[in-house]
Amino acid sequence: QKEVEQNSGPLSVPEGAIASLNCTYSDRGSQSFFWYRQYSGKSPELIMSIYSNGDKEDGRFTAQLNKASQYVSLLIRDSQPSDSATYLCAGSGSWGKLQFGAGTQVVVTP
Amino acid sequence: GAVVSQHPSWVICKSGTSVKIECRSLDFQATTMFWYRQFPKQSLMLMATSNEGSKATYEQGVEKDKFLINHASLTLSTLTVTSAHPEDSSFYICSARDRRLGAFFGQGTRLTVV
């Protein structure tokens, strides 16, 4: 079992709709979680970090963390074609390492 | 967010030669940096953890003599791919972690060995 699991997609979302991405993790010791966006051929870009249970909002993005269920999610409101990318979920591990999921590909259709 | 600069962004080299990739944290000090490799349509694969002033820690299956890592200062880590072969062609990405803000990635280096 991978330490961080994500649905690979692709997740097709109409423009203007909400994209919902899910991530589960197995390491109960993980304290910090991150969402990265990666465009094809580019390196990942940090878009959200979350450390406490509950919701965290930043612009059109909302991250949700439930440590009891070992579940992290990302909502993208008012999806735009420029949001089409692969979204990587990551949890903190030992020695500062991040454990990455395989990524979910999001395709926003006009 | 914090800025991590990686150079070069792409390189083409002949089989058997060595290539050095630099990774710098521009506005914060990073005692630890990470080197990843990513093949097309696959996720990031951690190769090694670079520790300032000490030896790097390599992940299982990564040849330490082939992928030389030097972390000479709190803002610079280098990865040297020695005796490169076509199968080493990949996208190499470094990352430095700011304890408060999270991990930030360099722009990546696309290595093509011909």
Image (tube, coloured by chain):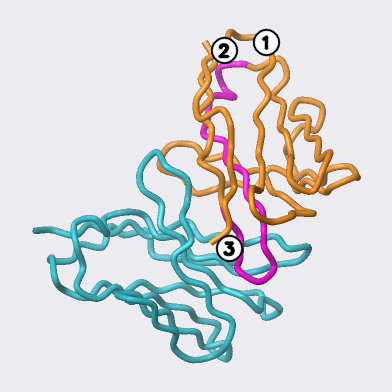
Chain colours: A cyan, B orange
Q: Is residue A37 above or below residue B55?
A: below
Identify the image quadrant of residue B58.
top right
Question: Which chain does the residue under circle 1 lie in?
Answer: B
Label 3, secondary structure: give it. Answer: loop
- The residue lying at 27 percent from left, 59 percent from top is A83
In this view, the residue farthest toward the right is B54
For the residue carrying disc 2, how many other residues have a C-alpha within 10 Å: few (<14), some (14-19), or many (20+)? some
Is residue B15 located in the magenta-colored stretch of the structure?
no
Query: Left of B44 or right of it: where is A63?
Result: left
Q: Position of residue B97 (x, y in %)?
A: 67, 59
Point out residue B8 in the picture as x, y percentages from the top left corner: 56, 27
Q: Position of residue A53 (x, y in %)?
A: 54, 90
Q: Chain of mark 2?
A: B
Q: Amino acid at mark 2?
A: Cys
Tell me, for residue A2, which label it has, or none. Answer: 3
Please tell me whether mark 1 sits on a helix, a strand or a loop: loop
Kind of residue sitting beneath label 3: Lys
Q: Is residue B54 above or below residue B19?
A: below
Write down the region rendered in magenta.
B85-104
Say which mark, if any, is on residue B17.
1
The label nearer to you, 2 versus 3, is 2
Label drawn at residue B13: 2
